[in-house]
Amino acid sequence: MFSALLTSSLIGFLAPTPLHPDALLGASLAADPLLVPDPQGSPTPRPRWLAGHSVMQGFLGMTAFDEYEVEGDNLGSVDGGGDSASQLPLIGGGGQWKLGGQNIDLGVELMVSFAWRSNATAVVVGSGGAAVAVDVDTLLFDLYGGPFVSKFLGEKARIYASAGPLLEWANYDQSASGVTDSGTGFGAGWYARGGIEFALASRTMIGIGARWSDSTIDLDGGLGDLDLQGVQAYITVTQGF
């Protein structure tokens, strides 16, 4: 009788304990953090970008203004659209914060950028209609932001678009034949931008983008308004997904 009890105890100790289905589900979720339960209890894919989270984006590129005009007291009206004065190297970055959405991400962004060009060439149109070449130095600082929309194309690509107001500060100098006009000032305008990015193995995304902007800056130092309108093209690097 004692051996029978001993045998029964050993069998009970060594026999595997059956797992409840909920425990099996929990184990699968722990193994794959990209799965979360839906209301029916079955695992569903987790969104790639969760609401309330942000990503950071940096970019490097070039600005090309179709409209680049300023009114000067000494030299006259400068038109640099299409000339070297309107082509400025660009660097910047900022963040995008997701507020909601599932298949399409919705949120807001805030960006800053610097653009500059020294010893560039523009054209002054004098009172008699004669065109004179001038040397132009330009430094621009932009702060801009607004709502954006974003969508992942599978796991390897993302597209996005945004628009909103733009604040701009400029330092501007122009000179010709020993005559110089210079001034600084603030202005405002609007922008719209978009791009596409592709995921690397490290989950960093790299892509290309473009921004259109239209702004007017009130310059001091005897200068009038600096009117700018054109497109920026750049390469982006985004992290945080």
Image (spheres, rainbow, N blue to C red):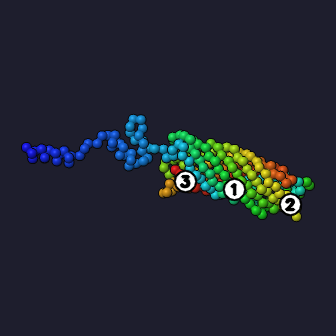
Q: Secondary structure at mark 2?
A: strand
Identify the image quadrant of residue 134. Answer: bottom right
Give the residue displayed 68% in from the left and 47% down from the top: 144
Q: Report the disc number at residue 114.
A: 1
Residue kind at label 2, given as amino acid type = Thr
Q: Which residue position holds label 2?
A: 180
Dividing the image into 4 quarters, which one contains the N terminus?
top left
Labels 1 and 3 touching (C-beta < 8 A): no
Give x and y (percent) for residue 101.
53, 40
| Marks 1 and 3, the one that precedes in the sequence | 1
Horizontally, is 11 left or right of 42 in the view? Answer: left
Please state which of residues 31 and 224 is positioned toward the viewer in this rendering: 31
Q: Report the disc number at residue 13.
A: none
Q: How many marks?
A: 3
Q: Report the disc number at residue 239.
A: 3
Q: Secondary structure at mark 1?
A: strand
Can residue 163 be seen by looking at this rendering?
no
* Location of residue 61 with respect to 35 vertically, above or below: below
CA neighbours of label 2 inside 10 A, class few (<14), some (14 to 19), many (20+): some
| Marks 1 and 2, the one that precedes in the sequence | 1
Give x and y (percent) for residue 210.
64, 51
Give the residue displayed 23% in from the left and 46% down from the top: 16
